[in-house]
Amino acid sequence: MNENSTLSLLGHEAAPAANPEAATLERVTNPHAGTQYVTRFTVPEFTSICPVTGQPDFAHLVIDYIPGDWLVESKSLKLFLTSFRNHGAFHEDCTVYIAKRLVDLLQPAWLRIGGYWYPRGGIPIDVFWQTGNAPEGAWVPDQGVPPYRGRG
C-alpha cells in the first residue's frame, strides 16, 4: 500500500486542532531519498498566547531540514502551526516543541529552526535549535531574517 494514500488531511476539509498536542502531523514518501537537499518552510505570521498574560505573541519562524525517507505534508504542518494560535506557551517552548515534533515524525538527516519573536515588554526573543551540525557539503542558506532593530 502506498504510504501517501493514508493521508487524512490533504484533499479533505480539516480544521486546526484545539492545541498542538492534539494536532496531526503527516508525512509523505521522499521521492529523492538519498539525495542531500534542504527544504525550507518560512512562517512569517506564527501566533501563540503568552501563558501568563494571555496576550498574543507573534513570530517569524524558519524551519530548514534535510529529508531522509520522509517529507512533512505541508497542509498538516500548516494546521499544526495554526493549533498554537490559542495555546499558552513561552517562546522557547513553542519553538523547540515544533522542531522536536518534526524530528520525531520525519527522522531527518538534519533539522534547524529559527524562531524570531517580535518584542514583548520591549524585548525581542529569538530562539534557535538544531539537531547538530549540517552534513558536510549541504548547502544551507542563511535564514534571511535580520535581527530586530526597532526604530533606532
Image (cartoon, rainbow, N blue to C red):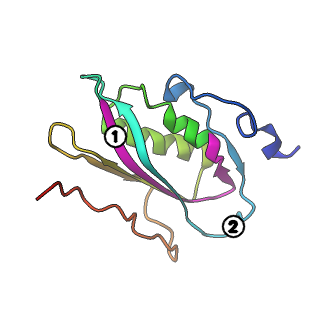
Residue 47 located within the stretch drawn in magenta:
no
Tag shown at residue 58: 1
Q: Within 10 angstroms of label 2, few (less than 14), some, or many (20 or more) residues?
A: few
Q: Which amino acid type is shown beneath numbered disc 1? A: Phe
Give left or right: position of 1 versus 64: right
Q: CA distance from mark 2 to mark 1?
A: 36 Å
Which residue is more in the foreground, 137 or 48? 48
Circle 1 — which element?
A: strand
Which callout, 2 or 1, points at the residue further toward the start of the chain?
2
Per the rendered image, the range of residues in magenta is 56-75
Q: Within 10 angstroms of label 1, few (less than 14), some, or many (20 or more) residues?
A: many
Give left or right: position of 44 versus 81: left
Query: Please, is residue 8 above or below residue 108 in the view?
Result: above
Name the residue beneath numbered marker 2: 34
Q: How many marks?
A: 2
Work out which quarter of the rendered image holds the N terminus and state it. top right
- Please identify the dominant SS of the magenta region: strand
Query: Please, is residue 10 above or below residue 129 in the view?
Result: above
Q: Residue furthest bottom?
A: 137
Residue 150 sits in quarter: bottom left
Where in the figure is residue 62, as x and y percent of width and height? 43, 54
Circle 2 — which element?
A: loop
Q: Which amino acid type is shown beneath numbered disc 2? A: Gly
Q: Residue furthest left?
A: 152
Give left or right: position of 95 versus 101: left
- Residue at figure coordinates x 30%, y 24% from the top left: 51
Where in the figure is residue 147, as x and y percent of width and height? 25, 59
Where in the figure is residue 17, as x and y percent of width and height? 56, 26
Q: Residue furthest right?
A: 1
Q: Residue furthest front?
A: 151
